[in-house]
Image (cartoon, helix red, strand yellow):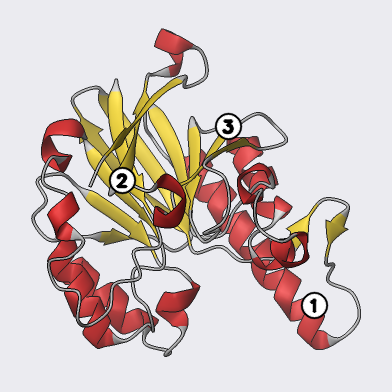
Amino acid sequence: MIRVAAAGDLHVGADMAGVYRGGLGRLARQADVFLVAGDLTRQGTVEEGRVVAGELRDLGVPVIAVLGNHDYHSDQQDGIADILREAGVTVLEGDGTVVDCDGGRLGVAGGKGFGGGFEGKCASDFGEPEMKAFIQHTKAFADRLGTALLELDADVRVSLTHYSPAEDTLEGEPLEIYPFLGSYLMGEAIDAAAPALAVHGHAHKGTEKGMTQGGVRVRNVALPVIQHAYALYCLEQPEAAGAGRAEERVSAW
């Protein structure tokens, strides 16, 4: 059994030192790893990044994060990522990492992701250069994500993105903004690799539990959705429980 804690959309401001960390007191006793699904900051500034680094430093478990759209807002995303790495956080962007846990080797691949919409109700790379660039960006990321997932040498694999790979976990959001919340292209890449779990954030009014078209479990761990400091997913190795069956719990603030 590998215990995966996850949360997204922390939206830490420069005045929030210690606020989020206060909910992580039991993390090391409950989980083997902590996944953070983007939007760590409010405005995407290096100053906020330093506060986030303080919240995530020395938690007693490996911390793996991706950035979100808020973290890109001030064009300081590289600085934020560097600060997080200096604090011991693994930051992914189209690549993967493997963590040795008591229950086996956990492989995590991910990155921010992007939008575009879902099958039958999506944009396409046709027409204006701006529209082509929009969708080609998502296609390029989905390709990197799929490759990174397949290349993980691990007992259990997990996808970690900010944008959603499935419609199910967007339920509650206005239909009009689905194209800006995720893309089926990421879902297709995830289905091709068949990880045990796909974790994302971004959709504050969405739903926690869903599934890709290919049957991979998807979890929206945005804090406004899970209403706890983190959600906890206990993943068994495929040979022990089918294709990554998950027992799920949440930890209160």
Q: What residue type is labelled 1?
A: Lys
Pointer 1: what residue?
A: 132
In primary-sequence order, the first of circles 1 and 3 is 1
Query: Could you give the CA–CA distance between mark 3 and mark 2, rounded to whole angstroms?
Result: 24 Å
Residue 135 location (% of width, % of height)? 74, 70
Q: The residue tagged with tag 2: helix, strand or loop? A: strand
Q: In this view, does 244 lie to the left or right of 191?
A: left
Q: Residue furthest bottom?
A: 74
Q: What residue type is labelled 2?
A: Tyr
Q: In this view, does 83 lie to the left or right of 194?
A: left
Residue 231 location (% of width, % of height)? 35, 40
In primary-sequence order, the first of circles 3 and 2 is 3
Query: Could you give the CA–CA distance between mark 1 and mark 2, rounded to whole angstroms?
Result: 37 Å
Q: Is residue 124 left or right of residue 205?
A: right
Pointer 3: what residue?
A: 194
Which image quarter is the N terminus in? Answer: top left
